[in-house]
Amino acid sequence: MLFIDRNVTLIDFQDKKERIVYFYCSNNLMKKHIDTKLIRFYLWTGFGFFLLFSLAEFLEYPETIVKRIINSFFLVSYTTFLHFLLFEVAFPLFKLTWKRFFAGLLFVIVLIIFYSFGLYGWRYLWIQLHIYTSFQKDATFLKAVASHSQFSIATIIFFAIVRNIYNNIKLKQTAQQLLVEKKEAELNYLKAQTNPHFLFNTLNNIYSLARDKSDLAPESILRLSKILRFMLYETDGAYISIEDELKIMDDYISLEKLRYDDSLVTNFNYSIENMKQPLPPLLLMPLVENAFKHGVSETRNNPFVDIQLSLNERHLNFIVKNSTSENADVQNIKENIGLSNLRRQLELLYKDYNLSVQQEASIFIVTLKINLTSHV
């Protein structure tokens, strides 16, 4: 049973709601500021400096190297933490408002004290615990502070160089990732354009049969359903097998043939080394569509479509020949959506490819060659 306290006002509820939102946002900001990759970077950089410094100590003082390695561990651990505060907390404040600028400046001054006097105090603490070994027993206080300040400066320079290299690598990776995402978005847009275009062309074929009250209209609808099923369930992924691409191509050719009488001659031959070879879905279909829509449909005498496909050692050769009108001119050919989209998809997908068109006497030839190993 639910009990409602009538004394709880809307203002109380609003106040609680704001506190919940504030708590939620604070947690998110805290999670955002805790960058585990950045922490690992500083730990690994500190470890790298520790190894280099220990190697230099070994070459100069081999007889006391064990004690010096222990000393180096405490010094590098301390300065690594200060470097994180310097580069990730203090320096970013200088890019904000004047108020934060002065806060950052004050923070840097405090860090300088910790780099000099603080490092000496850190060393003195472990000396008192008989863990750190002092090799400057005769040095004065200021001389010892100056010596450890030099160590701090050396580590700052080392971390600054490594951090700059790290940031440049991250910027390049981010730029590369943005480029990949941009290409993927454009590729998805092109696919989204191609699929409806392919569907509309198919619907036009059925419409022409239905308008003529052809008995072949039911069969064409059945074949269309197969094509639609393929487009809905098979083309969402990045790849399909060449075998599936051949099936949808064969269904489309059969659907197109229903529009024409026996005068249309079609020939579809292929030689595939591996029928499971992955291929971007509907990559080859625009060339087949182009052959029927802009070739056969405009041919009055002896229409034909000849398709030759070979795929061996991951080199694809696809040749589509179709009849055209006698007055067709290759220079006046206007690329439709399907063909222009295909050209752009090839640019985004492969480095080694060639798509060429050729007009001969009443014959239009499109040749596509792709080295499938050259995928971007």
Image: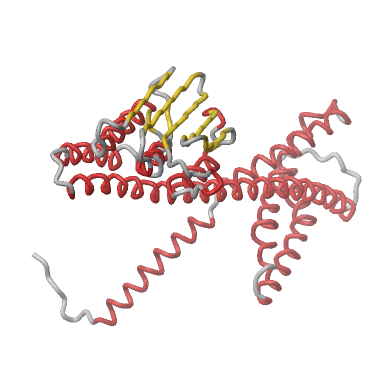
- Which one is in front, 146 or 7? 7
Q: In which quarter of the image is residue 287?
A: top left
The picture places residue 193, in percent across and down from the top left corner, at 39, 51
Q: Residue furthest left?
A: 1
The image shows residue 4, relative to residue 229, as above or below, that is below
Which part of the image, by quadrant, shows the N terminus?
bottom left
Which part of the image, by quadrant, shows the C terminus?
top right
- Which one is in front, 183 or 97? 183
Q: Is residue 237 visible?
A: no
Q: Quadrant of residue 12?
A: bottom left
The picture places residue 336, in percent across and down from the top left corner, at 44, 49
Q: Can residue 101 be seen in this view?
A: yes
Say which residue appears at 87% left-offset and 43% top-offset: 137
The picture places residue 114, in percent across and down from the top left corner, at 74, 57
Display coloring? secondary structure
Left or right, 259 with respect to 219, comes to: right
Say which residue appears at 36% left-offset and 33% top-offset: 302
The picture places residue 36, in percent across and down from the top left corner, at 55, 47
Left or right, 367 with respect to 154, comes to: left
Say which residue appears at 85% left-offset and 26% top-offset: 62
Left or right, 148 with respect to 254, comes to: right
Say how many tags the image has.
0
The image shows residue 184, relative to residue 254, as above or below, that is below
- Which one is in front, 44 or 170? 170
